[in-house]
């Protein structure tokens, strides 16, 4: 068995310390400016990455965050676990009964929010590839589907964190956004799987058809039968094991097993973590105190590690293409806002509420970066497009919270009149 040597362990520990310290400092700075802490955490990653630190002193950057080697593999594994845990804690915060109450509204919002950006991205990239600095390409269909999917997905871990930071997660608006994002994620993962299969990179060992069927079965069974079984098992766990350690340990077991299952069938680990989090958090035997312990631990340790990592290995200067960045941002913001707004209006919501939901659903994150890196490795997209996607993700996070806040404040002012 291969082990990290003395210096590799030192570097790994310094990496984690630097990431957590910078995340906390810039997160608190963002909070001072009435922004979600996630904004500061992403900025911390940009500063520690090749864009700032790498430009100031490339040797220091490369020694701290090497792109290859065992240390980078271990850090990548920690980041992957961080993403899984982020989705798990986000799922635990969902009140399923309140989500079901959103039914028709969430369905309208999710469908319009998914298919309007998907169609816009597909058509623009298919008929105007020059906007992405591409005159010709080998697989136009897959590329266009990729761009459409990138624009259509709503990032659950990011929007959940923003809603928590704005203290509106458990409100009706917050639950409506989460419910809509859940539906988008289910459909989005299926589209994601199809694209991976078309690129020859399906991460699971099963066919696309089997993956889709198993994903739907897993989701339905976990939110019905699975939730009932968990509700019966938890009292026994609380009686048998020391509290809260026993409950938290078993909760993590559920999380990792569910994540491993969805990763195996080719849908991605974080989806399984989110669904099992919903089922577990909805149990009456999962106390608010236990949820708070998990919430604080993950959101203050693993959450920052993930958000810092977004900007850690991307050089936003050398691979920056203004045209591609502008096209992606305009497409992402307008198509998502239009789709979500009209979906919310059809669901019976007022103008300001619909705008707030539109800005909330306009948050991008994990999946886009994952899909982008796979597409880049398969030569489907260029580095410029990948950088533009990451910038679009960051811009969407930066503007979502203040625009949501502004829309909701307008709604409150109109009620007073």
Image (tube, rainbow, N blue to C red):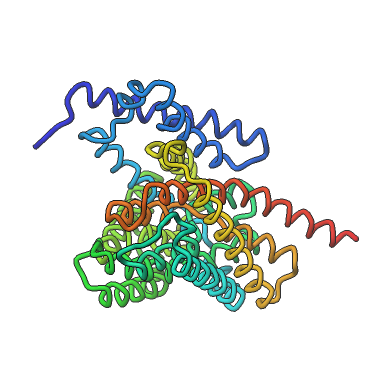
The image shows residue 226, relative to residue 379, as above or below, that is below
38 left or right, relative to 76: right
Return the residue nearer the eye: 69 or 159. Answer: 69
Q: Nearer the viewer, residue 371 or 51?
A: 51
Residue 351 shown left or right of residue 64 in the figure = right
The x and y percentages for residue 9 are 24, 26
Let me know if residue 302 appears in the view: no
Asked if residue 80 lies left or right of residue 351, the reply is left
Q: Is residue 273 above or below residue 205?
A: above
Q: Residue at x 32, y 60 (%)?
A: 268
Q: Percent x, y for residue 79?
A: 35, 43
Of residue 402 and residue 122, the one placed in the foreground of this image is 122
Q: Whole-percent x and y of residue 98?
A: 58, 68
Counting the numbered discs, the total is 0
Image spot of residue 256 (x, y percent): 30, 54
Query: What residue occupies the far left of the structure in this picture?
Result: 1
Instruction: Look at the picture and state if 132 lies above or below 45.
Output: below
Between 1 and 136, the residue placed more toward the observer is 136
Instruction: Point out the residue furthest to the right here.
Output: 417
Q: Is residue 164 above or below residue 63?
A: below
In the picture, measured across the screen, residue 84 lies left or right of residue 28, that is: left
Q: Which residue is at a point 36% across and 57% down the rendered structure image? A: 371
Q: Check the picture and name the quadrant holding the C terminus.
A: bottom right
Report whether residue 170 is seen: yes
Query: Residue, x 62% and y 63% (percent of image)?
Result: 337
Residue farthest to the front, as pictured? 135
Residue shown at 60% from the left, 55% from the top: 169
């Amino acid at each position: 068995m291969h082990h990290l040597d003395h210096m590799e362990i030192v570097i790994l520990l310094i990496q984690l310390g630097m990431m957590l310290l910078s995340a906390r400092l810039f997160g608190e700075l963002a909070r001072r400016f009435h922004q979600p802490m996630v904004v500061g955490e992403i900025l911390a990653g940009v500063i520690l990455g090749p864009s700032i630190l790498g430009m100031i002193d490339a040797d220091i950057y490369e020694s701290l965050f090497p792109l290859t080697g065992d240390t980078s593999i271990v850090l990548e594994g920690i980041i992957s676990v961080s993403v899984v845990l982020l989705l798990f804690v986000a799922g635990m915060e969902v009140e399923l009964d309140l989500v079901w109450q959103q039914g028709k509204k969430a369905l309208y919002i999710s469908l319009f929010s998914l298919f309007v950006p998907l169609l816009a991205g597909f058509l623009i990239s298919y008929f105007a590839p020059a906007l992405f600095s591409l005159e010709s390409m080998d697989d136009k269909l897959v590329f266009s589907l990729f761009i459409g999917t990138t624009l259509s997905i709503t990032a659950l871990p990011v929007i959940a964190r923003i809603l928590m930071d704005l203290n509106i997660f458990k409100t009706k608006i917050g639950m409506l956004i989460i419910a809509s994002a859940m539906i988008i994620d289910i459909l989005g993962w299926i589209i994601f799987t199809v694209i991976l299969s078309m690129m020859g990179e399906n991460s699971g060992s099963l066919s696309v058809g089997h993956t889709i069927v198993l994903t739907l079965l897993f989701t339905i069974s976990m939110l019905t039968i699975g939730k009932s079984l968990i509700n019966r098992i938890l009292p026994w766990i609380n009686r048998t094991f020391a509290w809260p350690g026993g409950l938290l340990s078993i909760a993590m077991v559920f999380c990792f097993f569910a994540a491993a299952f969805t990763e195996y069938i080719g849908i991605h680990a974080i989806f399984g973590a989110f669904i099992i989090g919903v089922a577990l958090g909805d149990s009456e035997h999962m106390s608010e105190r236990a949820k708070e312990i998990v919430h604080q631990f993950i959101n203050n340790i693993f959450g920052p590690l993930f958000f810092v990592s977004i900007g850690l290995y991307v050089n936003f200067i050398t691979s920056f293409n203004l045209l591609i960045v502008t096209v992606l941002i305009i497409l992402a913001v307008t198509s998502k806002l239009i789709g979500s707004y009209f979906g919310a209006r059809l669901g019976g919501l007022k103008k300001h509420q619909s705008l707030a939901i539109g800005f909330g659903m306009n948050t991008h994150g994990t999946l886009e970066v994952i899909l982008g890196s796979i597409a880049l490795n398969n030569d489907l997209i260029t580095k410029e497009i990948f950088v533009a996607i990451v910038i679009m993700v960051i811009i969407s996070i930066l503007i979502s919270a203040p625009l949501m806040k502004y829309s909701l404040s307008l709604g409150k002012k109109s009620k007073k009149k």
